[in-house]
Image (cartoon, rainbow, N blue to C red):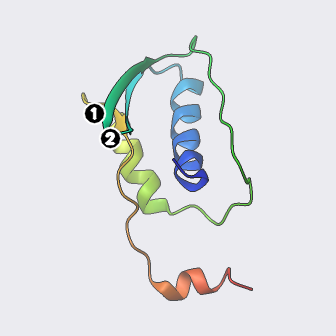
C-alpha cells in the first residue's frame, strides 16, 4: 500500500477510534483479503516511507468514511479522479 492510501486510512481510522467507534477494516494483500476488527483499545501504528503529502481528496475521504459506517466496514476504495489541473498546482 502506498503512503497516499495509508494517509487516508489513517484519517478515517483515527477519527473513528477517537469517537470510540468500533468497525472492521478489510484490506487486500498478496492476492488475499483479510479483515480485522478495530476499537479504541486496538494498538496500531502508521508507518510512512515518505511523509510528504499533497492535499487530501475530500470525495475519497467521504467515500471511505461512509464505508466505515456500513456493516461491511472500512475498505480501501479506488481514489476518485480529480481534474488534472488540480494536481498541476502541486507540481511546482
In the figure, is residue 89 to the left or right of 70? Answer: right
| Mark 1 secondary-structure assignment | loop
Q: Which residue is mark 2?
A: 67
Which residue lies most toward the top here? 41
Quadrant occupied by the C terminus: bottom right
Q: Position of residue 65 (x, y in %)?
A: 41, 43
Image quarter for residue 82? bottom left
Rendered residue at 40%/20% (across/down): 36
Image quarter for residue 71? top left
Using the image as rendered, state which of residue 56 and residue 26 is in the foreground.
26
Q: How many marks?
A: 2
Real-space CA distance between mark 2 and mark 1, rounded to the nearest whole angstrom: 5 Å
Disc 1 residue crowd, few under 14, some 14–19, many 20+, Cα 10 Å = few
Q: Are marks 2 and 1 in contact (CB under 8 Å)?
A: yes
| Mark 2 secondary-structure assignment | helix
Q: Is residue 36 above or below residue 12?
A: above
Rendered residue at 69%/61% (across/down): 53
Q: Position of residue 14 (x, y in %)?
A: 59, 33
In the figure, is residue 33 to the left or right of 85? Answer: left
Q: Which residue is mark 1?
A: 70
Disc 2 residue crowd, few under 14, some 14–19, many 20+, Cα 10 Å = some
In the figure, is residue 17 to the left or right of 34? Answer: right
Rendered residue at 74%/53% (across/down): 51
Q: Position of residue 70 (x, y in %)?
A: 27, 33
In the figure, is residue 88 to the left or right of 72? Answer: right
Amino acid at each position: 500500500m502506498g503512503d497516499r492510501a495509508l494517509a487516508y486510512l489513517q484519517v478515517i481510522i483515527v477519527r473513528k477510534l477517537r469517537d470510540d467507534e468500533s468497525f472492521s477494516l478489510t484490506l487486500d494483500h498478496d492476492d488475499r483479503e483479510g479483515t480485522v476488527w478495530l476499537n479504541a483499545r486496538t494498538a496500531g501504528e502508521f508507518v510512512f516511507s515518505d511523509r510528504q503529502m499533497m492535499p487530501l481528496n475530500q470525495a475519497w475521504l467521504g467515500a471511505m468514511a461512509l464505508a466505515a459506517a456500513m456493516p461491511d466496514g472500512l475498505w480501501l476504495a479506488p481514489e476518485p479522479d480529480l481534474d488534472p489541473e488540480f494536481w498541476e498546482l502541486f507540481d511546482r
